Image (cartoon, rainbow, N blue to C red):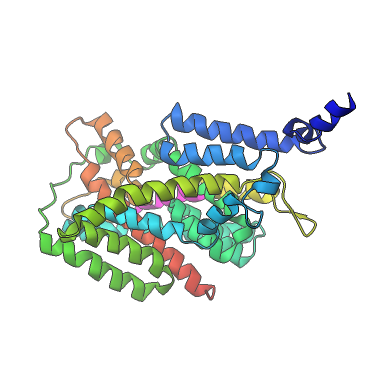
């Protein structure tokens, strides 16, 4: 019996029966729920399945010894890509290599919708200050409003690395829940007549324009927000690889192999960083804290505000436009590419099967990616980074 008890004390079962360790079980259930959403509901499976499994992994017995916070462990080495912020730019490289900016180039006024949706970032920034977060934490939390997971991680590593787990999980959670969150807001803010608006087919964009755009876009945005040079530089570089016509192999590698590998590593490491309890200098820096609840609340608020701001600004633009735009596409101004654009398209199809909004919605959608990165650069500049 003594030998059995000695063996039992080395197992994970013994560890789970210790005081407060039931919180790790709660986190494992959360991880399982993420996997369920990814597989059963098909909500961003490429993100939620790795993150969900990472949450389970990071809260298993032994994670404290072999996990992301243990110097020299395998997961700690992989986590360097998150902590030092070099995974997000590589994801932006892949996004740029797979994104077609043609609709935005053909109808540049739609970039204003992507800019309007970023209002959610600054509204959340103010909300975080009101809830007691310091200015650096508020800056990191605010970027959730852009619905851009890589940018949220990038900014968190700079401004509030201790909040990286909750911020990343909140950002990716709300990205995955785009089909649930956005339709009710769009329906409340638009009339039936507005939802039936059909937009003109965009003009064809020439190859020269497609090549000039990433170069000009990079120069202009970095002059505005130098702090976002690693994100926007890789985004526009990836797009140049795609559009140049002479670097197809590089574009395919960036848009397939690189982004897939980094998505796996980023997802598993972010998930593994969400330990239920993590004591640092006598303070619990774990995931299950009051701060995490506040961050998730602010994340929901910011996503709703960003969606509403895009729709309302589209309605405002229609006051001055001869050729009206369907205000539903304003909701695609958040950075959840291409899910938000798809939601708008499917919603438009519910009211008129002949109304094809996907290509129009992609313009503010990709503008939102640029806008959230610019907003991150602006915050870094304002806060002295």
Q: Is residue 274 above or below residue 93?
A: above
Q: Is residue 53 above or below residue 383?
A: above
Q: Is residue 326 visible?
A: yes
Residue 86 on image: x %, y %: 46, 61
Residue 11 image-quadrant placement: top right
Left or right side of 19 for 180: left
For the point 10% across and 53% down, which residue is it? 203
Extreme-front residue of the structure: 3
Does the magenta portion include 312?
yes
For the point 34% across and 58% down, which residue is it? 93
How many discs mark residues in the rendered view? 0
| Quadrant of image for the N terminus | top right
Q: Is residue 2 above or below residue 46?
A: above
Q: Nearer the viewer, residue 296 or 199?
A: 296
Residue 225 on image: x %, y %: 40, 72
Residue 334 on image: x %, y %: 38, 51
For the point 70% across and 53% down, which residue is it? 285
Stretch in magenta: 301-315
Residue 59 on image: x %, y %: 66, 40
For the point 40% across and 67% down, which residue is it? 230
């Amino acid at each position: 019996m003594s030998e059995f008890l000695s063996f039992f004390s080395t197992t994970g079962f013994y560890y789970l029966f210790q005081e407060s360790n039931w919180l790790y079980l709660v986190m494992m259930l959360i991880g399982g729920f993420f996997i369920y959403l990814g597989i059963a509901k098909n909500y961003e499976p490429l993100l939620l399945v790795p993150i969900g499994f990472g949450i389970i992994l990071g809260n298993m017995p032994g994670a404290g010894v072999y996990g992301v916070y243990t110097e020299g462990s395998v997961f700690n080495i992989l986590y360097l890509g998150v902590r030092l912020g070099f995974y997000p730019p590589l994801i932006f490289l892949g996004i740029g290599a797979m994104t077609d900016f043609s609709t935005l180039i053909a109808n540049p006024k739609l970039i204003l919708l992507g800019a309007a949706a970023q209002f959610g970032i600054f509204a959340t920034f103010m909300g975080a200050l009101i809830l007691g977060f310091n200015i650096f934490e508020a800056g990191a939390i605010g970027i959730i409003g852009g619905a851009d997971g890589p940018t949220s991680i990038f900014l968190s590593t700079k401004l509030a690395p201790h909040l990286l787990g909750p911020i990343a999980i909140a950002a990716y959670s709300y990205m995955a829940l785009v089909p649930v969150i956005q339709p009710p807001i769009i329906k409340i803010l638009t009339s039936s007549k507005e939802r039936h608006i059909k937009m003109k087919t965009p003009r064809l964009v020439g190859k020269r324009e497609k090549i000039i755009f990433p170069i000009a876009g990079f120069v202009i945005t970095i002059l505005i927000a130098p702090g976002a040079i690693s994100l926007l530089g890789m985004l526009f570089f990836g797009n140049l690889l795609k559009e140049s016509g002479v670097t197809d192999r590089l574009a395919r590698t960036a848009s397939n192999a690189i982004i897939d590998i980094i998505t796996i590593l980023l997802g598993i490491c972010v998930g593994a960083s969400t330990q239920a309890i993590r004591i640092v200098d006598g303070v619990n820096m774990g995931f299950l804290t009051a701060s995490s609840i506040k961050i998730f609340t602010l994340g929901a608020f910011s996503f709703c505000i960003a969606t509403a701001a895009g729709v309302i600004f589209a309605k405002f633009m229609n006051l001055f436009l001869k050729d009206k735009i369907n205000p539903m596409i304003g909701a695609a101004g958040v950075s959840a590419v291409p899910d938000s654009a798809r939601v708008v398209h499917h919603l438009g199809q519910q009211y008129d099967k002949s109304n094809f909004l996907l290509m129009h919605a992609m313009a503010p959608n990709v503008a939102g990616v640029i806008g959230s990165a610019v907003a991150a650069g602006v915050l870094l500049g304002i806060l002295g980074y």
